[in-house]
Image (tube, rainbow, N blue to C red):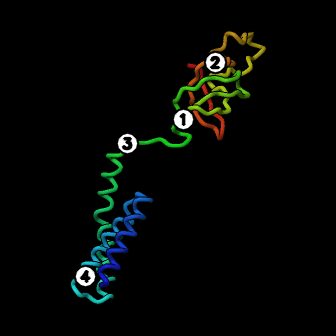
Amino acid sequence: MAWLWWIGAALVLGVIETLTVDLTFLMFAGGAVGGAIAAALGASFLAQAIVFAVVSTLLLAAVRPWAKWQLLSTTPDMRTNASALIGREATALTVIDGRGGRVRLGGEEWSARLVDEARPAAPPAHRGYAASALPGPTRIEPGADVRVTAIDGAIAVVAPL
């Protein structure tokens, strides 16, 4: 009857593995299956615990690195949260300049500011540069399409398309 406890432990460890997806708890679940087999064969509890420890250690040392490599090599690199917004297009809702503005991004309204490369620095007066001679716009008008180049806290840093 002890083998049922080991199977129950393996199932619980399998459920925990589905939450972590690190393949560690899956190796412990394999060790619990080993303990269940030992219990079904009539081994003492000490022998069952030793089988659990040995099988878990072997799985962690030998199988997990290979399985983890396989998992990572076949899983696409998925960006989540704020990093998933970088590169997306948005629409300016208000004037956007270096100090701020608002954009519609993925159905939500975000604070935004113009990317630094598009914002020219104040021209040096002694060289006689005119502001219009410097590259990039200094502001983006409402309704213009922009691309998110970075997320700075809760502010979308944008550049004109």
Q: Residues within 10 Å of mark 2 (few under 14, many from 20)?
A: some
Q: Amino acid at mark 3?
A: Pro
Q: Quadrant of residue 124?
A: top right
Mark 2 in CB contact with mark 4 (< 8 angstroms): no
Instruction: Please give the name of the residue rendered at 34% of the width and 67% of the height, measured from the top-left corner.
Output: 27
Residue lying at the far right of the rendered structure: 125
Which residue, given by chain and number where applicable, does mark 4 sit on?
A: 38
Q: Which mark is residue 85?
A: 1
Which residue, given by chain and number where applicable, does mark 2 sit on?
A: 143
Helix, strand or loop status at disc 1: helix
* Mark 3 or 2, nearer chain start: 3
Q: Amino acid at mark 2?
A: Gly
Spot occupied by residue 156 in the image (x, y as percentages of width and height): 62, 33
Mark 3 in CB contact with mark 4 (< 8 angstroms): no
* Mark 2 or 4, nearer chain start: 4
Which callout, 2 or 1, points to the residue nearer the camera?
A: 2
> How far is disc 1 from disc 3 in space, using C-alphas?
17 Å
Instruction: Please give the name of the residue rendered at 29% of the width and 89% of the height, measured from the top-left corner.
Output: 44
> How far is disc 4 from disc 1 in space, using C-alphas?
52 Å
